[in-house]
Every structure is written in C-alpha cells, then in structure tokens.
Amino acid sequence: MHEHHEPLIRISKRDGISKPRAWGIRLIAVVLSLIVSAIIIYSLVKMNPLEVYASMWKGAFDEKSLFTQIFTFSFTPKTWYFIRDVMILACISIGLAPAFKMKFWNIGAEGQVLVGCIASAFFMINFAGKMATPLLFVCMIGTSILAGAIWGIIPGFFKARWNANETLFTLMMNYIAIRLTAFCVSKWENPPGSNSVGSIRYQGKERIGWIGDMFKNDNPVKFGNDYMWLVLIVLAVAVFMYIYLRKTKHGYEIAVVGDSENTARYSGIRVPNLYVRTMALSGAVCGLTGFMIVSAVDHTISTSSADGRGFTAIIVAWLAKMNPFVMFLISVLLVFLDKGASQIATDFQISEYASEIISGVVLFFILGSEFFINYKVKLGRNKKEG
Amino acid sequence: MDNLNAIELRNITKRFGPVVANDNISLQLHKGEILSLLGENGSGKTTLMNMLGGIYFPDEGQVFVDGEEVTIRSPKDSFAHGIGMIHQHFKLVDVFTAAENIVLGLEGDKGKLDKASIRKAVREIADRYGFDIDPDQKVYNMSVSQKQTVEIVKVLYRGANVLILDEPTAVLTPQETDKLFKVMRNMKKDGKAIIIITHKLHEVLDVSDRVVVLRKGQYIGDVETARASQQSLTDMMVGHSVSLNIKCPKAEECKDRLRVKNLTVLDKEGVKKLDNVAFDAFGGEILGIAGIAGSGQKELLESIAGLQKLQPGAEITYISPEGEEKSLVGEDPLDIIHDGVLLSFVPEDRFGMGLAGSLCINDNVMLRTFRRGKGNPFLDKKYPAGVAEKIVNDLEVVTPNNNRIPIRRLSGGNVQKVLVGREISCNPTLLMTAYAVRGLDINTSYTIYNLLTEQKMKGVAVIYVGEDLDVLLELCDRILVLCGGQVSGIVDAHSVTKEEVGLLMTQFRKEGAENA
C-alpha cells in the first residue's frame, strides 16, 4: 500500500480567539514558566523553588500580606516603591503609544524624559522660594512638557520634511539629552566636587517643589504622599490617552497613518503635520514623566534619572498593543520580576545575573504564548473521515 | 487506463480555518489536452492548483501523476513530477537575463554556468513552440508578456510535461493573448498537458478542449468545449441564469466636468509616467481608460486626486454642476475636499491606498466622513456605521461583523465592494475607478457596472480604468487609450472594435523605443 506522508506539525492562523481563551493561554504560560524556572533553580543551585518565589514576592511587596495592605489602605514602603516604579514605567509607555500606533518608532523616550527632568530641576533649583509654590509647580510641569515635546518634535520634523529615519534620529537624541544632563549636573553640583546634584532643597533644608509635600497638611487622602500623586497623574494620563487614541479624530488619523501612509494621504490627512503633532504629544507625556521623576521620586537629577526605562517602555508599549490600561499590567509584571530578582540576589547570596534567569524564563513564556494565541498548532496525522 | 491521465486528483479537500476552499474535488487532466479551470473568484481554482504546485498541502485526498500516487510537499517535489506552474505574479530576478533566470536554482555541472549551451537549449525550446524570446535580454527591459514567456520557457526547460497557467491573460493585450494561445496549441501538439485558470469565457471557448467548472469550492462538472457556450458556462459558474448584457443608456445631457491639459508627471527616477496628457470628462458619461498595465493609468487618476507632483504648465480644471470652475493644480486631497469638490476615487491598490487593512469596515467607511462636525474633536461613529450597514446590505458584503474584524481578513471581492460602496456613498460629481471589478465575481461585477451606470445617469462624470476590453466597449461612452504615458487616441466606444483599441494600446511604444 502506498504510504501517505503528512507533515508532523501543522500550523495555521487562528481566525480570532475569544478573550477568556486568550487569557487562559496566557495563564497557562505563566504557570508553565514558574514550573520551568523551578526546575532550573533546583538543578542549578539546589534551592527550594518555593522559597525563591516567596523571596521574589517579598522583594516587591514586603512580608506583610498584600491583601491586608490593600484593605487597610496602608502600604509598606516596599510596596510603595513598587507602585512608584510601575507608575513611572507605565507613564513612559503611554507616551510611546501614539507614536508607535502611527508606526513612528520613537526610541527616544529616554532623552525626552531626561529633558523633562532638566526643565523641572532647573526651576526647582533656581526659582524655589522666589515665586509662589503653586506657580513654581505650573512652571515645572509646563516646561517639562514643553521640553519633552520639543525633543519629540525635532525628529518628527526631520521625518516629515526630509524623511529622515526616525529610529536612528530619536536614538541619537537620547545621547544628546544624556550629555546635556551631564552638563547640567556639573553646573548644579551640590556640594561642589561631589559630581552630583544631591537632594534638591531650598536653602539646604526646605522641600519646595516636592509634590508630596505641597498639600501635606490638608491632604484628604490618608495614605497620601509623593507616590499617591504619581498614581493620580498617571491614571489621568492613561484615561486621556485611551480616549485620545480611540475616540478622537486625531486618534483615528494616527491609526490610519499607522496602517498605510498612502491611504492617509488619499483621504486627505496631511501626514507630515501628523508626524510633528503626534511626536509633540509623545514627547510631552515623556517630559511630564521627567517632572514626576524629579519632583516626586528622586528629588534630584543625574544622567541615570531615566535609568533605561525609556527603553524598557518600548517593550511594555509593544506587549500591551498600545492599550494604555494593559500597559499597567505589563509594567507590574516587569517591575515585579526586576524587584524579585534583586531580592533573590540579596537573600540567597547569588549573583543578580543568576536571578535574572527567572525573569528571562517568565518573559520567554509570556511572549511565546502570543504565538499560540495567534496560531493553531496541530500535532500528528489527520483522522480520515469515513 | 490510468495512463491516459497526466494528472488525476481524487477527493481533494482543503480547509483554511472554518472555510472549505476545496470540497472533495476529483478531476482528471488527459495527456495532450488543454483544460480550462473556470470559476468565479473565491471558487477555489488557485487553491486547487497550488496543491499541485506544492504551495499548499491537501487536508484529504490523493494526487496521481501518470497513474502513480505521489506526495507533493514543496514546489521542488512538484517540479520533480514534471509539473510546472506559472503564477499570476512573476517570480523573476530583474537584473538577470532571461537565460540566467531560466537556470536559476538548478544544479549545474560542478557549479559551472555554461551559458552557450543554456542559450542553445532556450533557442531550441523557443523554436519548437514558437516563442519570441531573446535569452540575453535583461528582465527589467521586458514587457509583461515577455516576462511571462520567460516563466513558461523556464518550466519547459526544466522538463515540465504539465503546465498550469494562473490567469495568464489578465495582463496581456488581445494581440499578445492570441500569441500565447498559439504557443499553447503548439505545446499541446507536442503532447504537453495544460491547465489554464481563467474567468474570461471567450478565451475558454477559444483555446481549451475541455472545461471544468468550480463553484464555492465544489466541483460542478466538466464539459467538452465544443458543446459549451458563453451562456451555458456562465450558468454553471454562477449556479443560476444571469443576463450578460451591460445596459449603456445615453444620458440626457452631458456637461463639461473636468478639463485636463498639458499633464506631465515624472516618477522618482525622473522618467515620464504621463506625457502631455489632455482630455475632457463630461457629467453623464462614462469615460473608459484603456491601456496595458503601467501605461500611466495610476498616475493619471492620482494626479486628478491631488496625489502626484505635476510638472509646471499642467491644467486640471473641475467644473461643478453649477458651472463654477476650479483649478485643482497644486492642491492636495484635503484642499480638494475643502474646495467642495465631490470627487470619489477607487484606487487600484486597495490596501495600499484605498483602505486601511487593519481597521474594521466601519472605520474604513469613516475614512471619507470622519471630518464631519467641525470643531468637535471627537469622532462620530454612528453615522459611518449606518453607511457601512447600508453598503453591506446593498452590495451583499459577506462579513462576520462590521465593527471588529479587520477588513484585510475579508475576501478580495468583499473588500472591493466596501471600497466601491464607500466612494459611491459620498454622492460624488466626479467618480474615478481603477480596476473597480478586479477580483469580483460575475454577479458583483454586474452590480458594479449597474451602479456606475446609475451614477452616470445621475449626471456624474465617471472615469473607468479597466482591463477587460469587452467590458470597456460595452460599458463606456468614450474610451481614452493610454500608451506609455501618452494619449494614443480617444475613441467612441460604440463604434470602435476591440482590435482597434488593442492596436492603439501598443502604438506609441514603438516610437518610444526608437527615441531611446
């Protein structure tokens, strides 16, 4: 009899998948990644994987039960740091969303954040105590947004006018911003010779320009502090961006340009203008994040104020498929893995690189699960129908 | 007994997700015959042939070559069994010569390229079947029909006994088509078996011995060509009787709507794509534009729509139904909208220009109307949803939904219906269409012809760029023929013959060659 050969594995594109099933696949991916990590942990360092996972959890949320923390409205400092880092990362990602949706590869968030930091620090250092504090905040926020926007507009304009490659351009703008920051740090050095700016305080003690201190006494939110402000601002930005991208004419134009530039031209959208306008918005949100880093998080400025998060945000925005709310989820995951990895390193006296293997495995599975959401894989032969 | 069949397919089924592209199809191809595979778009012709060509693998069923069951997993397997497929889109290396393309991918003797013997072999094949081919010509210097010749010689050189031609005449002039058919008959005499995929009925009747009809993935039947007629084949294809007449009533009055003069357009390399084009288009008239693909049709329509950079001296004047004149030179599409010019345009490249493939039907319909409500930053999604609903119902667009599935996922015919429907829904006064029925089945094509005629009767100036000369002659009032970017003639569609138009389509090219 003739033997009928068939391929061993068949891969076919899915015709769309229900949401619960997609999330089911993602959940399986997370569980699998934990199992695989456990095997790796055990075989490499002979440690109890459960203890390691517990340590990761501790790294992010401290030892007090997260459940209690949420329901008593009192977070431990570690949990607040966790929230803070999630907010900053999510905010930069939200800034990237409009540019990416337009398929304008803005790799320059790092620089746009930094120039925002510079603008805020400039006002804090030079004008604290010399103008009313509310006005100081207006200036800090306004100039940070403006600085970020300008940093975004420059590559946008060159792309619009001369079709300059935006990926390289925005990337190079980062280095300019880093050098510019280094220059400012040397100018504002405090104390002299330290090669750092140090905690920015008015006349060495008063915390003017620290957003958490501004409404300290009459703050109605019990657990209010610097980081609560972050949550409020970033949530507002997320809501704004969600509406902007989905419900407005501008957002629609961005979607059309992202799909096909020619289609956009055909329908009367002036693509060059859109590049400039959208990059201004993208840079503005990143600049605003710069303000938050200086005013609410670091209270100082250095070349590592952005700390590579401008690049991490690219992954976040991409994984979230430009949905601002999903960006929070992805940020939670990335920050959790990051904090967990450092905690393991301290707790078990191993190199941080070793603990980052776990992050790698988890990310690998989660990214890999997208394949199974988009494609159907069938193993083995087909049944012959009688 | 089996040996009479060059190819036999038995119970072939192929599914794509929930779609059954081929449902339990069995067919035989006899040795030394030309078999037409006829069917509307989406009936599964190309899918079926791709399984012979090694592009797809059947889910179920068996394939026999010369009576032996075979497994075809790749194009290489397909070649090994002597099957040569010529695809609609040519797969040639532009900077290579014909001969180099022909041997590309073949294993030579110890890595040597013996050009002399290849040339000789190519000449032999050309002489035997009557091909017109120069082995040393570079592909980028070739016309579409020459490229097709290279593709055919390529598979013959590799020893193909069975040739599959996927819509080979779609890009050819009538004269070139005749030449191709002559070659096909010579190949048949030599014992080759040929399958030709087409949906042009007169070609089926002209060239083939037998016709197999597919409809919606199913095998409908086969007939000897001698006993078939255009009407009987159409009925088999569509499943019920259709009238094949395009109505072309005369509009009551024709008003000047568009005046074009001195229109010259260069491409990025500075080559003239349009050369001093001049014509008038009238409201209440369908102006057909004929020409070999790439003769400047695209640039002409895009120039009017404000999407091309014009050379100085060009005049494009729009005359509104009220008699107001407006120059469109130097305006971009937004200026044209702001000027109140009701211009609709169905471009050739659907996803590259007319639509945004990743957006849903509603959002694509919105492309024309999203600016409604001046000063309001928010989108009005309700209005386009209503328009989309009407298009989907009126033109029988098959879609799971209007507001979620990306339009790219719909079949080509349905996509085209949405595009044409949207452009007509804007109530244009000037309607330009490029290959509006490309990829549509017969039924829908006639729906579109009727829609265009309806528009014309409303007083709209319709410009129809087409490729099927039979349709152009029946549908249009006048035909403008483009050749190498120049207007080689504007003729009355009611009195001209197909051959005359075909001649105009190639006339200027010779002059151009002399100049170069």
Image (cartoon, grey):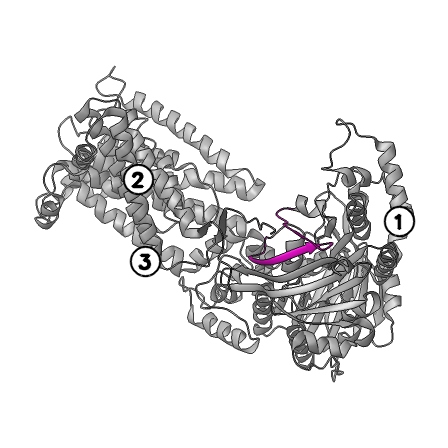
Q: Is residue B332 in view?
A: no
Name the amino acid, label 3.
Pro
Residue span colored magenta: B57-74
Q: Is residue A74 in view?
A: yes
Q: Nearer the viewer, residue B448 or B171?
A: B171
Residue at position x 76%, y 65% in the image: B289
Q: Residues within 10 Å of mark 3 (few under 14, many from 20)?
A: few
Outermost residue, top direction?
A193
Q: Is residue B448 above or below residue B111?
A: below
Taking the image as shown, residue B482 lies to the left or right of residue B351, namely right
User: Magenta includes B248?
Assistant: no
Name the amino acid, label 2.
Ser
The answer to whether the residues at label 3 and label 1 have Cβ atoms under 8 Å apart is: no
Same subunit, tags 2 and 3: yes
- Picture coordinates of residue B165 (x, y %)? 75, 56
The residue beneath circle 1 is: B132
Question: Marks 2/3: CA distance?
Answer: 20 Å
Taking the image as shown, residue A368 lies to the left or right of residue B210, namely left
The residue beneath circle 2 is: A33
The residue beneath circle 3 is: A20
Q: Nearer the viewer, residue A58 or B77?
A: B77
User: Magenta includes B59?
Assistant: yes
Same subunit, tags 1 and 2: no
Q: Is residue B292 above or below residue B471?
A: above
- Picture coordinates of residue B428 (x, y %)? 62, 72
Q: Residues within 10 Å of mark 2 (few under 14, many from 20)?
A: many
Q: Is residue A378 above or below residue B401?
A: above
Task: Give the foreground label among 2 and 3.
Answer: 2
